[in-house]
Amino acid sequence: MKIKNIIKSAKILGIATFMLSAQSCQDVLKETVVSGIGNDYINTPKGFEDAVNAAYSSLRYFYGTQQGLTLTEYGTDIYATGADGGYKGFHFYDTQMQPTVDYLQRVWDELYRGINTCNAIIDRAPESSISEATKKVRVAEAKFLRAQYYFILFQQYGGVDLRLSETLAPTKATSRASDADMYNAIIKDFTEAVADLPNSQGQYGRATKPAAEMALAKVYLAKAYSSVKAGDDFSKAAALTNNVVNNYGFSLLNDFASVFDENNQKNSEIVFAVQYTSDPLTNLTNNTGAVNGGNNLHLFFGMQYDVQAGMERDVLNGRPFKRLRPTQYAIETVFGERVNDSRYKKTFKDTWLANKPGTYNTAFDDSKAKVTFAAGDTCIFIPGYEMSKEERAKRPYQVLVPSKYSEALFPTNRKFFDTKRPDKTYEAGSRDFFVFRLADAYLMLAEAQLGAGNVSAATDAINMVRRRAAWPGKAAAMEITPAQMTMEMLIEERARELAGEQTRWMDLKRWGNLVERVQKYNPQAAPNVASKHLVRPIPQTQIDRSDPGAFAQNPGF
């Protein structure tokens, strides 16, 4: 495949600039710059380790970035567009979504770069002088990563060019694999990774058996709704997720908000995370399209607080890019119950404290003409319901009610706030991105059991998540009965738990209800969304790099 980032293996480690160098004295992956190395370097123990570690770097192009967020949260039932930013075709499903959009090409190229690195590791492993025990684990890591990269590509684009050996030279001979072939290859890789990966690894961030089991379960869930579904897909997904929740010592944290505490990222709920640091070199991939790299999700969910009375931009409240705002359905239905469920309050920021004292004219709150703030006073409050004008008038600050929500002013998802950035304009965040966490495993288990007809077991699984989400003393009130354990309950529960975590578009695509739910709950996108949007356009660069007519565009693009 003639893609600029699928390169000769002689250059894999030289061009893949950011290496993850295993150090026995540390319990996390350390990254160092490696360059000017030869073709045989990968056959040395150090070179083989560096190659495996380099294979992880493509994860940082998709997870915790605007391009990954664009392909996973834009244009769903729970998120609509904010006031600013580009790539709105992914929200609107209109003519802006074209095969020439750079994000489509960059994601494609970067994931194939990761795939070819994995292929080189797997193909060259027999010649490596690394110990057989270590080699077995590292090859399993490469298979885990290759399967994950292919699964992302498959879900986003449909069948792609399925290459399972190292690409040594540019080629225009390409083809699109069938759905069955895609699932077979991905399942084979993940299954072999499950068999050979250890339960845990000495270095945090490496793939493990439970991470591979959870990834494989996601594949079986997707397959269970597909044209190549098998009768045991749901039961296989249930068995895998049951292992994850019961056999490895993971546990739900007592408080939903604490999952996203930036000072407690290596917590008992995390099954697999993509690591970021405060080092700008470390955070970049060699094909980055993200400004400054890093986990920059903190940028995209913020409302325009920084031009309001009593406020100016600061590190604590973030740099608001206003890319995504919750839909009315998300606020009023998904997060509508707040007496027992704490997740509205703990997902959305609702209070801003003045950092620019003074007296100001009001803007969005028509219950008063002026407001005066000392430093630290509440200056903006979002009650989450239509507070009366009379009640608002009693408050010495501006109250933002739902009727005043706009593309610039809306409840702000707080999950990704990053207060460790060096200044208020800095874009690159250092938080890890949680790809798999235990609450998701419980929800996957509930979905699998529901699909297999085991409603009681599905109820038990979903109640684990719901009890944790309860306000103190409300756990019993949060429990549902088997009669309430429906697919709609599962769909909304995943939205409540995982809002913004790069899962929603993939969920709706898996269930086959993307078009229906976007038409029903996202007025911006409703006029244009159609069945063709269950996949993205194939990048024009890929078609151009193939033999004429060899690589077909997805229908409708």
Image (cartoon, rainbow, N blue to C red):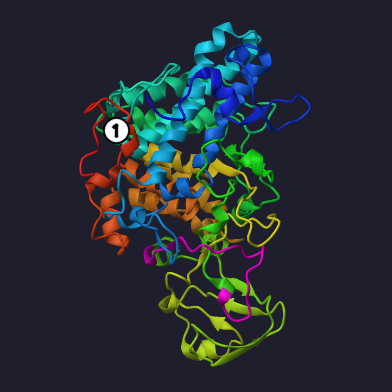
Quadrant assignment for the C terminus: top left
Q: Is residue 307 visible?
A: yes
Relative vertical location of residue 265 with respect to residue 32 in this rendering, above or below: below
Mark 1 Cα within 10 Å, few/some/many (few <14, many 20+)?
some
Judge left or right: residue 329 versus residue 210. left
Residue 421 image point, x, y percent: 68, 55
Q: Along the line of sight, which residue is nearer the eye, 389 or 74?
A: 74
Q: Along the line of sight, which residue is nearer the eye, 78 or 107?
A: 107
Q: Is residue 506 magenta?
A: no
Q: Which region of the structure is painted magenta?
A: 307-329
Give the residue displayed 50% in from the left and 45% down from the top.
Answer: 289
Q: Quadrant of residue 18?
A: top right
Q: Is residue 314 magenta?
A: yes
Seen from this angle, which residue lies furthest front?
36
Residue 389 image point, x, y percent: 47, 89
Is disc 1 placed on a helix, strand or loop?
Answer: helix
Q: Along the line of sight, which residue is nearer the eye, 530 or 516?
A: 530
Judge left or right: residue 527 versus residue 241. left
Residue behind mark 1: 543
Give the residue displayed 72% in from the left and 79% down from the top.
Answer: 375
Relative vertical location of residue 360 with respect to residue 177 in this rendering, above or below: below
